[in-house]
Amino acid sequence: MHAVVLLKQVPDTAEVRIDPKTNTLIREGVPSIINPYDAHALEEALRLKDKYGGKVTVVSMGPPQAAEALKKAISYGADRAILLTDRKFAGSDTLATSYVLAKAIEKIASSEPVDLVFAGKQAIDGDTAQVGPGVAARLNMALITYIERVEEFNPMEGYVVAVRKIEGRKEYVRAKLPALLTALKGINEIRYATMPDMIRAARYQPEIWGKEQLDVEEAFLGLKGSPTQVWKSFVPQAKARAKVEMLTGTPEEVAKVLVEKLVPLTLVANK
Amino acid sequence: MHAQGVWVFVEHLGGEIAPVTFELLGKGRELADDLGTELAAVLLGDGVRDFAEQLFRYGADKAYLIDDPVLKDYRTYPYAKGIVKLAQKYTPEIILIGATTLGRDLSGVVATWLNTGLTADCTELSIDKTTRLLHQTRPAFGGNIMATILCKNARPQMATVRPRVFPLPEPKPKVGVVVEEPLGILEEEVPTQVIKYEEEKGPGVYLDKAEIIVAGGRGLGSKKNFRLVEELADALGGVVGASRPAVEAGWIPFAHQIGQTGQTVRPKLYIACGISGAVQHLVGMQMSDVIVAINNDPNAPIFNIATYGIVGDVTEVLPAITKEVREALAGQKGVR
Ligand SMILES: Cc1cc2nc3c(=O)[nH]c(=O)nc-3n(C[C@H](O)[C@H](O)[C@H](O)COP(=O)(O)OP(=O)(O)OC[C@H]3O[C@@H](n4cnc5c(N)ncnc54)[C@H](O)[C@@H]3O)c2cc1C
Ligand SMILES: Cc1cc2nc3c(=O)[nH]c(=O)nc-3n(C[C@H](O)[C@H](O)[C@H](O)COP(=O)(O)OP(=O)(O)OC[C@H]3O[C@@H](n4cnc5c(N)ncnc54)[C@H](O)[C@@H]3O)c2cc1C
């Protein structure tokens, strides 16, 4: 089994704060982490490796610092790590991101065929959930989004079965290999790095691929290759409302007044 | 070719059209009118022809239909191929899709095959009349910022929108035209198969459809006190909602969380109990018709968006309201 896991390094958005003067994100001092969804995707891939043997390759597109996220993945037990970094990749939207990732997967697969590609459901910074489906579309791979677990991997007959969780139901989907799966958060318990893997990770240097190492056309890269642009950004404001009517008195009194106000609106009892 | 027309993808399950489709037709109607162009529904499925009439009543001028047994259950490949085929032939200017699990699965593939831009999870859409561009506003960085996205050169401009972000329009009698195309895909070409499924009855499923929501926050103080929220919801025939801290404290499952990282709701009545009114919570519920806020801090920001405010201790006010509601309803025999 050979699985490629797409890992994005993200700022821990739970730690992001807004500068009240400039209304911009304060990113200084905010720790960079492996996108939480991707960590679960990686764990799912490592479990398949534990069970069937084989190899897990992790790939990230980002600035040179993203090597840290890849080294972390090595410490969990990934075998090979590739960092896609090039000034020309900067400013990519999801279409340009999926282009570079898909080209990298093609290159990896040309020497070591890939059975499965794992991605997170979404990244916690961009939040679009578009890159996984985009990569699958580019590579013409079967796509199973929102997976909770891989139920069965059958390379002999060339299929995988995964359980996906969607509104109101769980689906067991069988897909032809190679397939791309996007993982939900919290679906598995992420392992601790073992001492030998930690030592290996400390010494490991991810391979660096830029534009020159990939079979890409410049027109599809970075800002140039991105049809969407962030035109402006601002801090969210709550919608203004007509002034609030305050109800005062003892709890019993306010309860009475409130219910009198709600009943004529036929709000109550419309189960 | 000159791109024209606003399209709305029709999501349906079990013979019923998902409400987000009607919400998008309502918004799509406005956008189409601003552009002076037509509004079309994009209807794929097996035996779904009869849906067209409903789509017209909600504002569509036209329905593009692909009706084929391969489209019986939703699957990414044949649905995406079908839409791409229609879009390449009829060149729409805009395509709107619900930001549901299905819509997010579909839209990323369609946009990639059409080689165009896609803006995720929009909360606002409008047309700039001088440039004819669609201004697409969406939250990013976990809701910490909002961004307005433009897709200047590629067509169609594509966006997904969460359910309940736009109001449900009033249906009106209207006729429209159906334009039918063949799918041209054989079952053997579809790389995925749903081999079985399990229905999951979770309260989260109903939250976005609820007309009455009673939501509790950190101000409840304990799991035991959180029962007071459930009791009022029960008395009102409503559904329980929660802020993130109440979920994180384990007082109630995540499916009940309202806000940026939870659900977006739009009930007729929203009662916020012991919730301060952080913007990440407000974005999920501020479109509610009537908002009642109960909080012991008169300066809590939740009062800025409330219709009625009560300054008081939730552990005293909630039981009093529950009692009053039960008494009021006891007089309305047969209503419940
Ligand atoms: C404020 C703001 C708003 C934006 N809005 C849009 C928009 O509406 N449309 C749009 O097309 N772009 C948008 N972008 C750009 C988008 O965030 C980037 O293209 C980003 O690199 C990928 O999108 P994402 O973070 O949403 O990833 P998602 O699509 O949410 O990520 C899903 C999965 O894909 C994989 N993945 C994603 N990126 C990488 C990577 N660099 N390396 C390895 N694996 C990866 C991971 O497995 C991840 O879990 C926006 C950017 C900003 C700053
Ligand atoms: C990226 C990100 C995403 C987020 N997503 C969400 C989300 O989806 N949903 C969400 O809700 N939050 C979300 N949050 C968290 C949000 O910022 C707030 O922290 C949260 O909404 C606060 O919840 P709260 O109002 O219950 O708690 P608090 O802000 O602590 O407010 C408690 C309120 O209860 C009042 N109170 C205390 N005791 C009593 C009493 N006895 N009687 C009456 N009133 C009392 C207090 O005066 C206070 O106003 C997110 C945050 C981030 C950074």
Image (cartoon, rainbow, N blue to C red):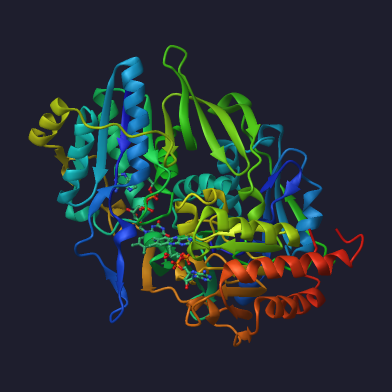
Front residue of A221/B85: it is: A221
Q: Nearer the viewer, residue A196 or A60?
A: A196
Please state the horizontal and vertical placement of residue B103, each as a whole percent of the image.
56, 49
Q: In which quarter of the image is residue A244?
A: bottom right
Q: What residue is rendered at 63% in x and 74% in y? A: B292
Q: How many labels does the image show?
A: 0
**Residue B9 in view, yes or no:** no
Q: In this view, does B283 lie above or below B9?
A: below
- Quarter of the image that includes the N terminus of chain A: top left
Name the quadrant containing residue A34.
top left
Residue farthest to the right, as pictured: B333
Indicate the position of residue B54 as horizontal and vertical percent values: 79, 57
Where residue B88 sits in the image (x, y, percent)?
55, 50
Residue at 10 percent of width and 36 percent of height: A202
Give the residue displayed 67% in from the left and 73% down from the top. B289
Q: Where does the image place residue A95, in percent across and percent down from the top left? A: 38, 51
Q: In this view, does B196 lie above or below B11?
A: above
**The furthest residue to the top:** A156
Position of the C terminus of chain A, as image quadrant, is bottom right
Towards the viewer: B207 or B56: B207
Residue A132 showing in the rendered view: yes
Q: Left or right: A5 with respect to A261? A: left
Q: Is residue A81 left or right of residue B205?
A: left
Q: Is residue A107 left or right of residue A205?
A: right
